[in-house]
Image: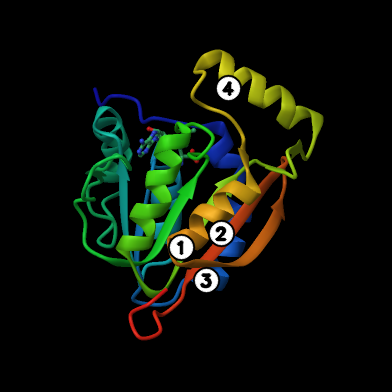
Amino acid sequence: MNPPLPFSQASENNKRVILEVLARHLTRGDSVLEIGGGSGQHAVFFATCFRELHWQSSDISSNVDSLNLRISAAQLPNLPAAISLDVNDPDWSCPCCNVIYSANSLHIMSTASVEKFFSGAGTKLRDNGVLLAYGPFKYDGAFTTESNAHFDLWLKDRDPRSGVRDFEWVNDLAENAGLTLLEDNAMPANNQFLVWKKTKLEHGVR
Ligand SMILES: C[S@@+](CC[C@H](N)C(=O)[O-])C[C@H]1O[C@@H](n2cnc3c(N)ncnc32)[C@H](O)[C@@H]1O
């Protein structure tokens, strides 16, 4: 008997609204790197919807086998096996790409890892590439809703290194990595979908 595929109800609930935003930013032929692929539901759904782009999912090594259960079951030509990628890896072992996508990972990672997430994304994205990050954020130090405040406490109780991140802090990290905010989309269930673009270097100086 085949092992059960990993499943996240949240991924099932948010994949269609995420798709609407992704559709505005993905172009035929794009190569996408997904960070923190989790159950693989997003990877399979988006690779099915966008057959003409290459979707490379990844996760930390302890999660890759589970992620690949769903990816290999899908057998999609544009969705290769997920690779092991921890944002703290000194050199992300993947080629440069046009798009980096990550959902619900920045509040799970430590703040040091979030810093590595942005510096790595700035390095791996090609000029004019986009970084898309979905999840809850705080603004001016305040939660957008009471339920996000409770979620933050729940996260920290589970792992003190986790927590809902400040939008201003992540945007500063993005800017320092050469990325410019294009969109901050308010999404259902108290989430945001942030989109940055890697702007071309002028005379090699940023
Ligand atoms: C809440 S899950 C989200 C999974 C999936 N993206 C989704 O939306 O359902 C957080 C993901 O971040 C990954 N993650 C945590 N720390 C990471 C790190 N240092 N580098 C890369 N991924 C990491 C976890 O392994 C997990 O897959």
Quadrant for ligand 1 reads top left
Give the structural element (helix, strand or loop) at label 3.
helix
Q: Nearer the viewer, residue 191 or 29?
A: 191
In this figure, what is the number of numbered marks? 4
Q: Which callout, 3 or 4, points at the residue further toward the start of the chain?
A: 3
Q: Are marks 4 and 1 in contact (CB under 8 Å)?
A: no
- CA gap between label 2 and label 4 equals 26 Å
- CA gap between label 1 and label 2 equals 8 Å
Q: Give the answer, above or below, for where 48 lies relative to 92.
A: below
Q: Mark 1 points at which residue?
A: 49
- CA gap between label 4 and label 1 equals 32 Å
Residue 25: mark in rendering: 3
Residue 40 x %, y %: 38, 42
Q: Do the residues labelled 1 and 3 touch (CB within 8 Å)?
A: no
Amino acid tagged 1: Cys
Q: Are marks 1 and 2 in contact (CB under 8 Å)?
A: yes
Q: Residue at x 44, y 76 (%)?
A: 27
* Disc 2: CA contacts within 10 A as few (<14), some (14-19) or many (>=20): some
Q: Nearer the viewer, residue 98 or 176?
A: 176
Between disc 2 and disc 4, the foreground one is 4
Amino acid tagged 4: Leu
Q: Name the residue under label 2.
A: 19
